[in-house]
Amino acid sequence: MDSIIDPDLLSRVIGKTIKVTLTTGCIQGVLINVHPDRTMLINKVKDLETGKIIPGAQLLFGYNILNVALQKDVEEVPAKHLDKLTIEDREQTSTEQRHADECNQDAERTHRDIDKSQDLRTRTLKVIKHSVDEEEVGYTIIDQFQPIFGPAIRHLQNQKVISIGAVGQNICRHGKLSWLQFATRSRVYLFDVLVLGSKVFKNGLQMVLEDKGILKVIHDCRWLGDILSHQYGIILNNVFDTQVGDVYLFSMETGGFLPHGTRTLEECLIHHLSMLPSKVSFLAHRQTLTKEYHDIWFDRPMDPTLLKLLSLEVTYLMPLRSAMLDAMFSDFTLLVDGYLNAYRRGTADILESPELLVAELPKELQQLRVLQQMRREKALKEYDVNNKGLLTRVEAEKAPRSEASGTKHDAELENVVKLTKSEKSFHQTMATNAPLLENQTEKQQGALCQKFPVVPNCFPRGPFDYYLYKKWASNDTPTTNVS
């Protein structure tokens, strides 16, 4: 057995059987691909310590590899020469032949396992292809530094907002990056990190990722931030995380409660952009592929269906951020409109000297206490509270809604949504119902505030707010007794 350590030498034995000594054991397999950092992909894998066959291809990281040796094939001795051998030679040859037969049987079983795995992978890819076929998205693959790498970097540097995604194996400080996805308003770039290596960051991407003037939209930035920091020395700056945004909006909508868990990107797109589950089902299949076939993102050339999946995933982050920002600021805008009309549409006898009112909290802003109370009451009716005091999101939110469900409730809700999206209607609603607390005494307001603590700067938007205004306008006060 010849010892091989250098990646250049390893690249010359691709397709050959090798023995790999790892920090955790010793395995044997056929070399498929090797990276300059000695990370390699092998197939037909066998654990030499236990003798067990490991199904599927295995990705081995360079820092775990102690030694690599080329395995010489066992030569079969022709039967006509057996009579010339001694008894000891015959026994040795017979043992070697049995070992070769066992290896062949193991190889056949491995091939069958691989074929089954490939069939399942093919079926999954067909499902994904059907899901993404109707979507139009263009993308540019960056797998070399000339001629398009430079223009791509300059385009990214000229943006105010970009969205980012990443795939690989176990994306964290102990994992491996394969692709980095970047989307702008007009373009999508897929950077092949596996092929380009760390130079992809040194030649420009690091400047983009660390630029505080470029907002990066990411869904769950923890893992990408970890791997970039520990493996490449890159510190992500100026990030808008859509998973964090979803939790923040839930807290707003429930008067300060937190959910029991986070949403996936697929769930966020359905909830915040009202996308049909069938349109984003490819994201669930993406998770399945990553879990079941962790090496799939290291295939080269990459299946076009998967490239389109990566492009769509990062493209949807931009409108998701916009929708979340609208939700976060719409109530603020609504209250400012009411604040603006507080005196303008009133009579002159209610006006006092502005200097005397500087230190007082206006009645229009005191309305937030009642808003918080009613939202908390509504949340406690709609959600279960677990033993940690968190609201349990119902799984029904994930279920596909029937497109033909023309119920009265849906029709009313649709009308309300249209109304809340209309700035003119917002103005009219606030102008009519601005003095919501005018008929309540300071004692009642104080009792409300003590019983339902106000969560500062958290108040939601949308159909439920309009429902509250209608309730107040009809003098239907909160159910809690505050007298």
Image (cartoon, rainbow, N blue to C red):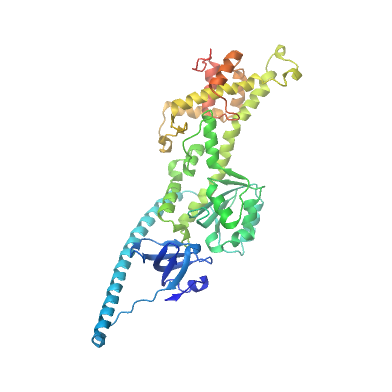
Residue 440 appears anywhere in the view: no
Against 77, residue 179 (above or below) is above
Against 77, residue 291 (above or below) is above
Residue closest to the eye, 16 or 99: 99
Q: Position of residue 189 (x, y in %)?
A: 57, 55
Residue 445 occupies which quadrant of the picture? top right
Q: Position of residue 234 (x, y in %)?
A: 61, 54
Q: Position of residue 31 (x, y in %)?
A: 43, 68
Location of the N terminus (image quadrant): bottom left
Against 419, residue 21 (above or below) is below
Q: Is residue 81 left or right of residue 70?
A: left
Residue closest to the eye, 229 or 380: 229
Q: Is residue 56 left or right of residue 476?
A: left
Number of marks in the rendered image: 0
Q: Is residue 312 left or right of residue 289?
A: right
Query: Which residue does the image show at 29% across and 70% down from the upper left?
Result: 102
Residue 355 occupies which quadrant of the picture? top right
Q: Which residue is situated farthest in the bottom direction here?
A: 84
Q: Position of residue 9 (x, y in %)?
A: 50, 74
Query: Which residue does the image show at 57% across and 41% down from the upper left?
Result: 321
Residue 296 appears anywhere in the view: yes
Query: Which residue does the image show at 23% across and 86% down from the upper left?
Result: 83
